[in-house]
Structures are given as C-alpha cells and as structure tokens.
Image: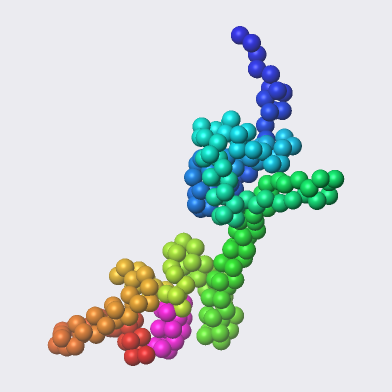
C-alpha cells in the first residue's frame, strides 16, 4: 500500500475562518452560501481576487446562475463588496471580505463591550441605592443572577426597587424576591405587576384567611406606584 505523503497534505491546508463556520447561521446565510464564501476565500488566497461565477460553479453543485444570485445576495446583505484597485496601470475590480470580517469580528467585539457596559449599569445602580461600594459577596450574587440564572436586567432592577420601597435594602431580601418570581414563572416586570394584582385580589376576597406575610411584602408597594 502506498504511504501517505504527509508533507503534501500539510501543504494543501488553508486557514478557514472558524467564526464563519460557527456563526454563518447567525448571519442568515445557508450552507450553500457559506460554502460559496469559503471557495471564494480559497480562490482569493490562490491569487484570483475576482473569480467569475463560471469558476465558482465548477467547485459547487449549483449552476452558474445560482452562483451569480448568491454573490448579489451576499453583496446586498453587506457580507461582500466589490472594490476597485486603482494602484495598478489598469483599474481592476475585486471582491472584498472586509464587510464579512467586520460582522464576524468587529461587530461581535462591539456587541460584547456593549453587553459588559449594559450589565455594568446594574452594579452602579445597586451601589447608588446601597450608598456604598458592593462587597465581593454582593458582586458575586449579582453575577450569579446574570450569568447562571440568566435573570433579565429589568427584573434585577425591579427587585431592587421593591426592596427600596420596602426599606429592606439587602441582597438576601432581593434574592428572595427574585427567587419568588422565578418560582412563579415571572419573567418580566409586566408579569410581576400582574402577579401582584392577582395576589391583592385574592387577599381582599379572603381577608378571614391566614396570609403569607412574606409574599405580601414582595408585592405590596410595587403596585401602589
């Protein structure tokens, strides 16, 4: 049996953008469109910066016409652009991947930064209401709500507001509010308001019955606003 030429295999490799493979679905393109992009990228690396639909079609299972449609679509979606190289004797057009790289890398990093800034506001708001810097334990608890329990920011604010209204500004009380809401399937401030209304309606109809004082505290002032 003939032995594999490993050097030949290594020389035949190209660096495929992992972010494209992982995120093409989020870019709202199909597997065929992603494969066309990959072939276009490979051909670029080989030196042909403006391959024809005929050339692309030879590596795919779709027609030349479909290749042309996909190229137009990718340009319309701002994933590709056609640029002009004016530095040469003759103006030459080429496909630019810069729009794709921006969406895969730059916009992703900007989104992460916005997310960090977005949740950073929670810590600032809590410190303002507490009137002091948060302790490591309190910071860890907020991170737990955000990262592990994935509690919406609006509910984290709402629980703080509830604690302020009840003059019980401590993390254990706020955590109890959030756990109570989670147990009841409450996922928005609107749901919390409805739950409170239902609670008060039931309380007024059953004044002679024992009331759950802890639960009453969670919703009492929230609905008076």
Q: Is residue 107 above or below residue 122?
A: above
In this image, 2 relative to 32: left or right?
right
Membership of 42 in magenta stretch: no
Q: Which span is picked out in magenta?
A: 158-173
Q: How many marks?
A: 0
Tell me the quarter of the picture where residue 133 sits.
bottom right
Residue at the image point whose x is 52% and y is 40% from the top:
66
Magenta-highlighted stretch: main secondary structure? helix
Q: Is residue 18 or residue 120 the one in the foreground?
A: 18
Provide residue 188's location: percent of width, then percent of height. 38, 73
Work out which quarter of the rendered image holds the C terminus and state it. bottom left
Provide residue 179's location: percent of width, then percent of height. 37, 70
Q: Is residue 17 or residue 54 the one in the foreground?
A: 54
Provide residue 99's location: percent of width, then percent of height. 64, 54
Looking at the image, the residue that sits furthest to the front is 90
Looking at the image, the residue that sits furthest to the top is 1
Q: Is residue 174 above or below residue 147?
A: below
In this image, 23 relative to 166: left or right?
right
Residue at the image point whose x is 40% and y is 83% from the top:
162
Provide residue 139's location: percent of width, then percent of height. 55, 71
Work out which quarter of the rendered image holds the N terminus and state it. top right
Tell me the quarter of the picture where residue 186 sits.
bottom left
Tell me the quarter of the picture where residue 8 sits.
top right
Membership of 160 in magenta stretch: yes
Residue at the image point whose x is 45% and y is 64% from the top:
150
Q: Is residue 65 above or below residue 103?
A: above
Q: Is residue 42 above or below residue 121?
A: above
In this image, 48 relative to 112: left or right?
right
In this image, 170 relative to 104: left or right?
left
Res 62 visible? yes
């Amino acid at each position: 049996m003939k032995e594999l030429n490993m050097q030949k295999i290594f020389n035949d490799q190209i660096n495929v953008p992992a972010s494209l493979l992982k995120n093409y679905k989020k870019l709202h393109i199909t597997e065929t469109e992603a494969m066309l992009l990959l072939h276009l990228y490979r051909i670029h690396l080989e030196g042909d910066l403006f391959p024809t639909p005929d050339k692309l079609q030879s590596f795919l299972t779709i027609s030349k016409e479909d290749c042309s449609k996909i190229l137009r679509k990718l340009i319309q979606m701002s994933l590709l652009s056609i640029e002009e190289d004016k530095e040469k004797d003759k103006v030459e057009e080429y496909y630019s991947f810069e729009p794709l790289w921006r969406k895969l890398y730059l916009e992703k990093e900007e989104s992460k930064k916005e997310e960090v800034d977005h949740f950073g506001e929670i810590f600032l708001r809590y410190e303002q209401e507490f009137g002091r810097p948060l302790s490591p334990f309190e910071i860890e608890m907020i991170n737990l709500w955000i990262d592990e329990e994935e509690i919406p920011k609006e509910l984290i604010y709402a629980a703080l507001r509830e604690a302020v209204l009840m003059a019980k500004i401590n993390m254990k009380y706020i955590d109890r509010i959030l756990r109570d809401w989670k147990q009841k399937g409450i996922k928005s401030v609107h749901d919390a308001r409805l739950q409170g209304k239902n609670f008060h309606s039931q309380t007024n109809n059953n004044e002679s019955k024992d009331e759950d004082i802890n639960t009453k505290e969670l919703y009492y002032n929230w609905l008076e606003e």
